[in-house]
Image (spheres, grey):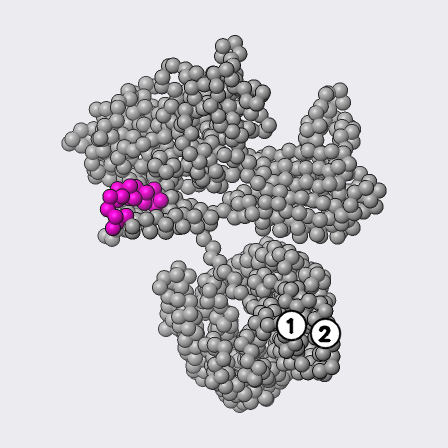
Amino acid sequence: MPYDTITDLVEKFSCELVLADPEDSSTFSGLLPVLKKMHGECKNLSLHPEAGQVIRARDMIAQGIAGNDVSAEQLIASLETFIKELSHAIKNAGNAGHRSKDTPACSMEAGPADTTDAKGTGAPDTPAGETDPAAGPGQEPISDYHADLETKLDELTLLIGGFCPGEIPVLGEMLNTLEGLMAGSKKITPSLFHDIATACRTYVETMTLENISSTRPVEEGLVLLKSILSHLKRGEPFAFDCSDVLELLEMRFEQEKTAATEPSDPVVNETAVDGQIADAGTETKETPAQKISSDDMEILVDFISEALENLETIEVNLIDLEQDPANMEIINNIFRPFHTIKGVSGFLSLNKINRLAHATENLLDSARSGDFIINDTATDAILESVDTLKQLLGRVSQGIDTGFMPLDDDIDVDALRDKLQTLQRALIKGDKELLGEILVKKKVVDQTSLDQALAIQREHPDRKIGEILVDTQKAQPGQVASALMDQVPSAKKPDTQVKVSTRKLDDLVDYAGELVIAQSMLKQKTMDYPLISQNVAQLGQIVTNMQTIAMSMRMISIKATFMKMIRLVRDLAKKSGKEVNLTMKGEDTEIDRNVVDALYEPMVHMIRNSVDHGIENRSDRLEKGKSAQGEIVLRAYHKGGHIIIEIEDDGKGLDREAILEKAKQTGLVTGKEQMTDAQVFDLIMQPGFSTAKQITDVSGRGVGMDVVKNGLEKFRGQLQIASKKGRGTKFTISLPLTLAIIDGMLVRVDEEKYVIPTMAIQKAFKPAKNECYTVEGKGEMVKDRGNLIPVIRLNEIYKTGTSNRKKPVHEGLVVVVESKDEKRAVLIDELLGKDEYVIKSLGTHLEGVEGLAGGAILADGRVGLILDVHGIFHIFGVRS
Amino acid sequence: MTETQNALHQAIQSTTLRTGKYLTFTLADEEYGIGILKVKEIIGMMAITSVPRTPDFVKGVINLRGKVIPVIDLRLKFGMDAIPYTDRTCIIVVEIDAEEMTIQIGIVVDSVSEVLNIKQEEIENTPSFGTSVNTDYILGMAKIDSGVKILLDIDRVLGTIELATLQQAKKEKDNE
């Protein structure tokens, strides 16, 4: 059936177009593979003008993605025209093709019949009548009214696309078109098409009457109608779950109507629809593993990576939502990824993913429209759904590896879906926060006057609590109004985001830095010209703002990573039956995103360790006089040019003796050494070392800590363990921030300028002559508050000194720096100032130079060297 | 031919043949050439921040419009005597191919002369000087009317820096 594939592709394209998000150019790139297939198909059918059209459309999209002077709305509009024209052209070509062929009817009918047979489906309810092979003469009118339906659907698409809330005439047109659809689809069996069209119309009616502005349910319905139509045309049974869409469409007015009556209708309706499609559904499920075509493969790979990313966003946001359940922005952030997953999985025929995502989305949608507030049960259910989706995606990616669609019969989504739906209904019944309570919370009225007002309300049930309060002069109308606003929190539109390559960001940061320098030079030169200098000052303001933004783009806060840990702790604690509370400190600490990635795995390992081995059972804790709830504290801060992450628990701590015993058994130590606590604790980072008596599925296989250590060492990071038996354990990760911004002191030594990270600096002072000491006439020291601190001469260890005269210590300044609890005093000539610097790599050739953390562009445009304090200590240590 | 075609043509030529355009410069009394496609830009002398614990010929780093790039003195690299920098002294910024990306390095030369079109037949293979001169990084010698130009394979010249830096660091350690 030559034209079916192309018609199908056209369908698919227009469906995706409807879903396309004008603010997200990536949705357009999703259209490209379809266009590619279309082009191939056109060529196969020797539809050359059409193939040309496809190419033009592709160019349009390419330009749109590149952001070249085409707005997304324009692009969508022109693509819609394109697809409409194309579908007409193909239809005409198709009809012409059939007429020219000798046995058009046979070729038409043999196709679908064959495919259904091949799939081994009994096809008990294959749409009879219109696609019946015997109905040869009836062929023309049927395809005619298919075409009619299609035109109407296209019209509707355009109407919805151009719809703005409150445009009653457009709604009227929509109603007309939908009625046309209903009339045209009466004859089609099964009546699914008709049902959905009816549901859409009812919804649009409700929209008109009740001033609802969301067109989403109709859009869903439309997409569904289009795919049903394309299935009808091919004579295949429609095996796509549509109960969700129907529900969505009906939910709205059911909700309004069932205020008084029992909400039994939707349930009945749902089961009816379920039953209807159940047969068709099982047919497809039982088909043997399908081979994935190479085109699909591409889309699938994209889909999976995107979906996994989306799921991560969802998890992070869900945790946020737990803290702030009424925040519309967060709900939106959770809703949108589900919507995307649902949309794409639908077209990829990933039925289970689609259905589950849809059910979750519905739940969130109700929450979004303020029907209820998401509670813990709902969060749990959504998390469960996220996990199941991950599982399903895992299957699909297995499938990509093998090239065959995997079977996922063992993963049950229906139970979860039911759960979500029940939950949704249960929650909708529950009330919003009461107005009176809001007013009390806001201290507008006190509890007694509220009780009085409630008493009045009981006598006059038709009066609203707000009115009563205003009438009795307990509250101002304005206050009540603002409380009402609070009751239904308004949805804030979240920022949209764009993906940008890090290289571009780096360049932007570089140029912004240059701009600042160029601007300051301009400022100096124009100081004497008041007219210009005013403009230059303005320019300076803009440049500074720009630089700040450019800088901040590379950095991300560690919050997202910490949030993931909350999720982890939550799950682990539940699994092990312990009560654990996670506190975060310094989660706004900014680090380069590469470093964030490096941190994730080690943190997971250590958190697992803490929950599983560290925190004791409830009874054990109470016995030891600790609170029943275990505490884990996550801390992040910058120190000495490093980012420090601390994971501290108040559990049982490390058992020095047990570790030594185990180490003796495995032959790591002989038992005769004198070892400090730190040395003993370091033993647990040896490969294969574990003291856990019980192996759980969480941790305890002894492959934890050495993995952590290796992972960190790859990023030149370090791990320290401090612990007190019975009191708790503290893991300290330190990672260098190669690209981070640091606070630094600019100092001068002879002619050289260096930046010393402020975090490493303890103090700077000018030593008096009697505070300086030498050992054997060489080793120099200064006394600071009774402590003797060795002096480092930078010009000596760097051999930059030009003059032979060794300047006495008391003639210069010393900066006391600390690294790993060691202190040294660096002798300098002058302190030039303190500023923020972006650490820049000195390039691959000079990266390994010891004692230097990198370079920084100074205010005069020169490069300053940032000192690596620990490295300097090392050089100094080797020398002395 | 359009500009892109031209560039492409050049690129193909330079990889297959030695024919092409060369930027020539002087070091002491010798004339050298670098394939023009390797040259990113030529800048005048600017403040160089020296980096300790590196070989002599690594002059340090400069700020090239916000990028920190290393600068080497080709005189010192080739073992010639250092001379004070004049207003003729230039830094040629070249792009060399590292493992995964191209990196920029500045090279200090006495003066930049001109861009020459050198044909394959004008280029002679490097004669052997025994062990006294390392000819690994010389592409060939171009004989043209104005004299002999030594054509450098700049990737190789600068590819040895990293090694030298490491050796230097090791030496420093051993000394200490």
Q: Residue at x 55, y 60 (%)?
A: A303
Residue A303 shows in the view: yes
The residue closer to the viewer here, A687 or A692, is: A692
Residue at the front extreme, as displayed = A473
Q: What percent of the width, then of the height, locates residue B170?
A: 47, 22
The residue closer to the viewer here, A578 or A63, is: A578
Main SS of the magenta segment?
helix
Q: Residue at x 48, y 58 (%)?
A: A497
Q: Secondary structure at mark 2?
A: helix
Check the residue under mark 1 and report the chain it is in: A
- Count of numbered badges drawn on the protein: 2
Q: Which residues are magenta?
A: A515-533
Q: Is residue A562 above or below residue A455?
A: above
User: Which corner quadrant of the image does residue B108 belong to?
Assistant: top left
Say if the magenta span includes residue A526: yes
The residue closer to the viewer here, A607 or A453, is: A453
Taking the image as shown, residue A774 lies to the left or right of residue A192, namely left
Q: Which mark is residue A452?
A: 2
Question: Counting other residues with Cα less than 10 Å from the Cα at mark 1, is it few (<14), some (14-19), or many (20 or more)?
Answer: some
Residue where numbered disc 1 is placed = A474
Residue A112 shows in the view: no
The residue closer to the viewer here, B127 or A697, is: A697
Check the residue under mark 2 and report the chain it is in: A
Looking at the picture, which amino acid does disc 1 mark? Lys
Looking at the picture, which amino acid does disc 2 mark? Gln
Question: Counting other residues with Cα less than 10 Å from the Cα at mark 2, is it few (<14), some (14-19), or many (20 or more)?
Answer: some
Residue at the top extreme, as displayed = A776
